[in-house]
Amino acid sequence: MATLARLQARLTTVAHQYYYRNSVVDVFRKKENDAAVKIQSWFRGCQVRAYIRYLHRVATIIQKRWRGYLGRQHYQLIVKLAYYTMKMNLYNAMAVRIQRRWRGYKIRKYCFNYFYSKEYLKAVSETNDAVRKALEEFAEMKEREEKKADLEREEKKRDYQARKMHYLLSTKQIPGMYNSPFRKDPDPWELRLQQAKPLTHRRPKVKPKHSVSLSSWLACTSARSFPRSGILPPIDRKRCQGPFRDVSEVWEQRYKPLEPTLRVAEPMDGLNEARAQLQRQEWTRNVNDNMFLPFSSYHKNKKYIPTMHLSSKYGPDAYGSQHFRDENPKKWICDKDFQTVLPSFDLFSKYGKLYSKAGQIV
């Protein structure tokens, strides 16, 4: 019991010590935890950095090997191109040397050969002589043809002149102009006149006058109608090969009837006829035949009838221009207003003034 009493007496002190020690332990535990976290973070950072350095070193080795491979490939390509260029330059130089030797030999043997040039010039001179001879023969032939044509033209002219002067031919009774009795032989024109036929003057044909009407001209039955084309060649019934139209359609288009325009189909005096017909229609519709003659004596004996709104002795009223119920006190006969005989309706006096909500008059 004594121990229990002592413990109860020290209960508050024990509780304070318990809470104090627990708080100290918590603080120490937090410090240890923070220290452990720092140590682990530092160690892990060192480990990761070491691994990254290892990866960088490995990547550098891979890139070095790959770039070396690409460089060697590019260098081999450059070497091949240089070798090909050198080889082609050598081939071109050898080809130029061979062509130079061959062209020199060809020029010396064929182009500047004395005997070959001599034969060539000889052939050219012979060809030139042959062409000159052919041209001279052609010129002589053309000259002969022109002379022959001139002679024929002169002969025709003389024959025509002889036909015109056939009346100068000598007869048995009277010698002609070219058959003089003082000459031993007659003139050559006399012989030509004897051989020629007299020239007859043709009378111009008088064309008969045809009375061509408008209907015959439009129907193309007269000679002075629209010009007609010649007869076209017939169209074969056999269909041609290609994208052509049907034969019946072509026939229809070729022989379609004439469709004159409205200007040709209508008569020339159609406008005057239409005006006359319009005047006749207006004359039949007109009821009052008396013409308005303001400057004549037609209306002198007619009595003037004033209008209704001007017939009042009080002057003209504003008929239609003002309200009919307007009041003008100046025109009143007496000073008093007109008095109504019947009293006014109460319904009309209250109309539009007193209304209830239900629409009924109060």
Image (tube, rainbow, N blue to C red):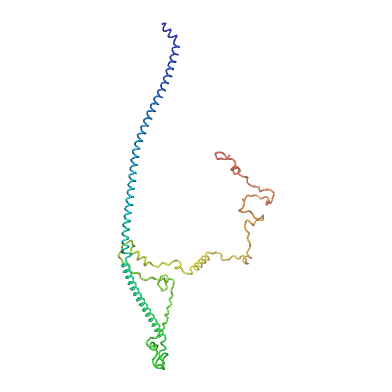
Above or below residue 156? Residue 283 is above
Q: In the rendered picture of this protein, how many numbered marks are placed on residues?
A: 0
Above or below residue 135? Residue 166 is below
334, 161: nearer the viewer: 161
Residue 121, image x and y in percent? 33, 69
Residue 245, image x and y in percent? 34, 62
Taking the image as shown, residue 300 lies to the left or right of residue 143, namely: right
> Which corner quadrant holds the N terminus?
top left
Residue 203, image x and y in percent? 42, 82
> Which corner quadrant holds the C terminus?
top right
Using the rendered view, name the quadrant where residue 47 is placed. top left
Residue 119, image x and y in percent? 31, 69
275, 224: nearer the viewer: 224
Above or below residue 148? Residue 311 is above
Taking the image as shown, residue 159 lies to the left or right of residue 115, namely: right
232, 111: nearer the viewer: 111
Above or below residue 40? Residue 346 is below
Name, please, the residue furthest toward the top: 2
300, 261: nearer the viewer: 261
Name, please, the residue furthest toward the right: 335
Using the rendered view, name the quadrant where residue 7 is placed. top left
